[in-house]
Image (cartoon, helix red, strand yellow):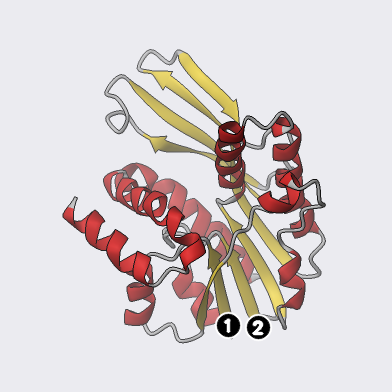
């Protein structure tokens, strides 16, 4: 609890005011990642390997943007910093521990941007959401990585829409997921998308207790790689059940 409190306090100090409400959930994710490190290791390595392999096949490596950089556990930041002239990390919150790691390793070519990548406000206002339009302004952009953020856009937006009892919830959620996918497709550079597409909660006998589509009804793109990720292994939420997510990469 003490380390979480320190992480929260230190991160709040360096986070823009409009994004401070999201610090608590980022710290909670950091805490869970530490507890579940062994169970998450294969997923994190799969993500990093997929990105490394894509980078290895590129001839031009000027600027790379990572959407949903988060804890940097699933992003090969060492490799990206070495291979690219500039690496831009975009997320709602950049934890103090992440900032310290980047500084300690002297990744001087990394830039941190706090930004809402959901498009939520435009979608709710019945406007056409273009959450990735800012990427058109990034000079010398050669690679954009969407790192396990797409499903979180849906989850976070669903929570907000439910709180507002918005009758257009399902339509808005699909539009937000589609906007992210279409935004990546429209970019004139290489892109990598890694996302969880569905989850299921099972007991120790294998019975499915709960399941959901994390892409909110939008069809999943054809994957080059796929694997499962035990987001909440036995003992995290309960000794009797686990939550496993299906992940794709393309």
Q: CA distance from mark 1 to mark 2?
A: 6 Å
Q: Nearer the viewer, residue 126 or 186?
A: 126
Q: Which residue is mark 2?
A: 62
Question: In the rendered image of this protein, does residue 184 appear above or below residue 42?
Answer: below
Question: In the rendered image of this protein, does residue 149 appear above or below residue 64?
Answer: above
Query: The residue tagged with tag 2: helix, strand or loop?
Result: loop
Q: Is residue 165 visible?
A: yes
Query: Pointer 1 and pointer 2: residues touching (CB < 8 Å)?
Result: yes
Q: Which residue is rendered at x = 65% and y = 83% of the image? A: 62
Q: Which residue is mark 1?
A: 86
Q: Is residue 84 visible?
A: no
Which residue sits furthest left?
2
Q: Position of residue 145 (x, y in %)?
A: 62, 62
- Does 220 sit left or right of 199 as displayed? right
Q: Position of residue 239 (x, y in %)?
A: 27, 23
Numbered badge on residue 181 = none
Q: Which residue is rendered at x = 20% and y = 57% of the image? A: 3
Q: Position of residue 15 (x, y in %)?
A: 43, 68
Q: Nearer the viewer, residue 98 or 123?
A: 123
Q: Which residue is rendered at x = 71% and y = 59% of the image? A: 131
Number of other residues with Cα within 10 Å of mark 1, as a class: few under 14, some 14 to 19, many 20 or more: many
Number of other residues with Cα within 10 Å of mark 2, as a class: few under 14, some 14 to 19, many 20 or more: some
Q: Quadrant of residue 103?
A: bottom left
- Does 218 sit left or right of 118 as displayed? right
Query: The residue tagged with tag 1: helix, strand or loop?
Result: strand
Q: Quadrant of residue 134?
A: bottom right
Q: Which residue is rendered at x = 74% and y = 32% of the image? A: 168
- Does 72 sit left or right of 227 as displayed? left
What is the number of callouts on the image? Answer: 2
Tell which circle, 1 or 2, labels the residue nearer the N-terminal end. Answer: 2
């Amino acid at each position: 609890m003490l380390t979480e409190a320190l992480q929260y306090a230190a991160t709040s100090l360096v986070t823009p005011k409009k994004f401070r409400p999201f610090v608590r959930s980022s710290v909670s994710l950091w805490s869970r990642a530490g507890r579940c490190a062994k169970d998450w290791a294969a997923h994190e390595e799969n993500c990093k390997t997929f990105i490394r392999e894509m980078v290895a096949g590129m001839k031009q490596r000027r600027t790379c943007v990572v959407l949903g950089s988060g804890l940097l556990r699933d992003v090969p930041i060492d490799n990206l910093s070495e291979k690219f002239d500039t690496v831009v990390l975009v997320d709602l919150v950049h934890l103090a521990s992440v900032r310290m790691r980047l500084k300690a390793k002297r990744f001087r070519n990394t830039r941190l941007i706090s930004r809402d990548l959901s498009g939520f406000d435009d979608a709710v206002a019945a406007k056409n959401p273009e959450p990735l339009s800012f990427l058109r302004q990034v000079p010398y952009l050669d690679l954009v990585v969407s790192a396990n953020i797409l499903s979180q856009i849906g989850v976070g937006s669903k929570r907000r829409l439910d709180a507002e009892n918005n009758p257009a919830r399902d339509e808005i959620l699909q539009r937000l997921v589609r906007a992210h996918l279409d935004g990546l497709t429209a970019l004139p550079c290489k892109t990598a998308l890694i996302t969880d597409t569905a989850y299921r909660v099972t007991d120790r006998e294998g019975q499915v207790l709960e399941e959901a589509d994390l892409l909110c009804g939008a069809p999943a793109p054809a994957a080059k790689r796929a694997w499962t990720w035990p987001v909440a292994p036995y003992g995290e939420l309960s000794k009797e059940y686990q939550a496993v997510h299906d992940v794709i990469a393309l």
